[in-house]
Image (cartoon, rainbow, N blue to C red):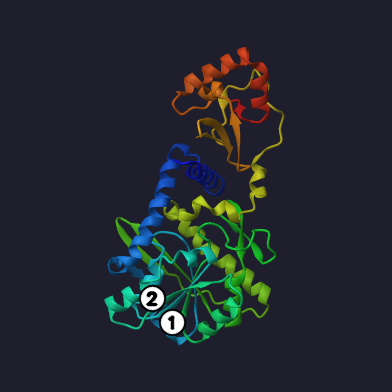
Amino acid sequence: MIRKNILRYASTSANLYNFLGDRNFANHINIYKACINNALQAHADIKSFAVDKAVIVDPANVLPDLLKRPTMLVTFHTGSYNLPASSLLKAGYKVNVLSDTESVQNHDYNQVSHLYQNKYKNDCSMEMVNVEADGAIFNILRQFKSGVQTIAYLDGNKGIGGQTKYNENMLDVSFLNGIIRVRKGLAFIAYLVKAPVVVVLSHRENGTNYVTYHPPIVIEERDRDVFCSTALREIFKIFEAHVKNHFDQWSNWLYVHNWTDLDHFKTKIVERRHATLAEVNEFNHDRFCPLRLDGKFYLFDRILYSASEVEEAIVPAFSFKSTREERVRFIEELKINRPDLTENLAKRNVLVPA
């Protein structure tokens, strides 16, 4: 893996550990690869009409009723995550997909409207709408009221677009074992047009794609801020349950730390007496992820999301190529031969008692 991918893998491992409590670190590389493959498959599926073989789950009959009232459709980069848009195009709807500058400039989906019009002989269309452009909100509201169906990805595939997670327009939302920072704009639009919010999610099961339209979230609340916070928290309750069942299909494990309150995870660092030199005998696999970058060795701190270089001579203390017995034996030798270094590693919680 190139440097960028190695660091993304380390962040993915940290995210799985912090949000899910997943300590099966040996499998994190497989989940990381699955997330990348999932994204590649999602891109392919929209152009190969995978929606034709997908199972649409719509107990509240959301899909056929969309023309009756404006509805805010919310989705995430999970499963074959372009299928919600595909299902609308197949049904003949005009669709706006809310996105950011980078995604719009990629031009990945410029030909989708033409492909679906020819395939299904309807007047469907899809436009990627840059929510960061000046006046975007007015354009979105105008088209929303005209009956164009609006889909918003609430996770942000690589972060949170043009905003930082410290922006005042972000809301703190509890999600799994963490706290994420979520854009309020989507809920604000739903509030302005008095629209119900529908979460639509995709997942794969036994080789079959499923697209699930959840029942509308209808909030009878006149106060704008209360409406927005309630809607966003309800959305993430639904998505949290989905992630627990299909965690290896969420492509955003690579990036979710970009819009997370990382200070929240520091509560895992328990203030306690540092272990003595005699007590430490094991590498702290829970907290530190060993990496090799450009021929050098690093330990990535899963709680602090930072990497520090270590000398090659101590690699056997944490190498996955060593057995546990070999690592313990090496640490015992390290105590004798390099007590100052061993004590420093103990103070940093790199070496801990078993």
Residue 61 seen from this side: no
Residue 266 placement: quadrant: top right
**Residue type marked 1:** Leu
Under tag 2, what secondary structure? helix
Query: Which residue bears the numbered disc 2?
Result: 88
From what the image shows, is residue 170 above or below residue 218?
above
- Toward the viewer: 148 or 15? 148
Answer with the quarter of the image where residue 353 lies: top right
Q: Residue at x 68, y 62 (%)?
A: 167
Measured as percent of width and height from the top left, residue 12 is found at 51, 46
* Pointer 1 or 2: first along the chain: 1
Up the image or down, 66 lies above or below 267; here it is below
Q: Nearer the viewer, mark 1 or mark 2?
A: 2
Q: Residues within 10 Å of mark 2 (few under 14, many from 20)?
A: many
Q: Nearer the viewer, residue 273 or 82?
A: 82
Q: Depth check: give the residue in front, 87 or 46.
A: 46
Q: According to the image, label 1 marks what residue? A: 66
Q: Position of residue 285 (x, y in %)?
A: 54, 33
Q: Viewed as shown, does residue 246 lie left or right of 137? A: left
SS for callout 1 = helix
Q: Quadrant of the N terminus?
A: top left
Q: Residue at x 61, y 27 (%)?
A: 352
60 left or right of 297? left
Residue, x 61% and y 75% (percent of image)? 134
Tell whether label 2 touches label 1 (CB within 8 Å). Answer: yes
Q: Position of residue 125 (x, y in %)?
A: 39, 78
Q: CA distance from mark 1 to mark 2?
A: 10 Å
Mark 1: few/some/many CA within 10 Å (<14, 14-19, 20+): some
